[in-house]
């Protein structure tokens, strides 16, 4: 059993676990992602592909809209 499955079982969410993804498969893609607030672009023209088995780091100083970018990718904005 994978770590994700164990955590899901511990949380009582077995039925919500996604199926396994093959290494190298594209799991998320964004094309020309952006958000403008009050006439100011916070994030503009972001393109990225997330691939299973690869790591991604979002780094920057405070206020560099890292959380905003991740919220946009999670469709939370």
Image (tube, rainbow, N blue to C red):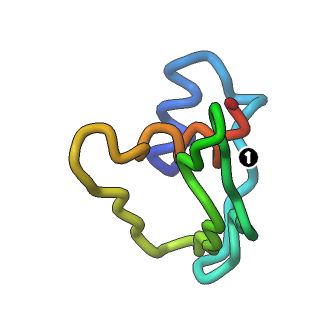
Front-most of 29 and 18? Answer: 29
Residue at 50% from the left image edge and 51% from the top image edge:
2
> Where's residue 43, x and y in %?
56, 53
Q: Residue furthest front?
A: 39
Query: Is 37 placed left or right of 54 in the picture?
Result: right
Q: Residue furthest top?
A: 12
> Where's residue 16, x and y in %?
75, 31
Residue at 64% from the left image edge and 72% from the top image edge:
47
Front-most of 74 and 63? Answer: 63
Residue at 24% from the left image edge and 39% from the top image edge:
62
Front-most of 36 and 55? Answer: 36
> Where's residue 49, x and y in %?
63, 74
Is the C terminus in the top left, top right, bottom left or bottom right quadrant?
A: top right
Label 1 packing within 10 angstroms: few (<14), some (14-19), many (20+): few
Q: Residue furthest left?
A: 61
> Where's residue 65, x and y in %?
43, 43
Image: 35 above or below 7? below
Query: Is 76 placed left or right of 3 in the picture?
Result: right
Image: 16 above or below 74? above
Image: 64 above or below 23? above
Q: Give the quadrant of residue 36.
A: top right
Residue at 50% from the left image edge and 21% from the top image edge:
10
Reading the image, the residue beneath label 1 is 18
As helix, strand or loop, the secondary structure at mark 1 comes to loop
Q: Residue furthest bottom?
A: 24
């Amino acid at each position: 059993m994978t770590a994700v499955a164990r955590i899901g079982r511990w949380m009582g969410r077995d039925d919500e676990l996604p199926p396994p993804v093959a290494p190298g498969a594209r799991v998320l893609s964004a094309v020309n992602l952006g958000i403008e607030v009050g006439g100011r672009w916070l994030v503009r023209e972001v393109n990225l592909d997330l691939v299973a088995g690869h790591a991604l780091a979002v780094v920057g100083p405070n206020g560099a809209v890292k959380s905003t970018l991740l919220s946009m990718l999670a469709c939370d904005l």
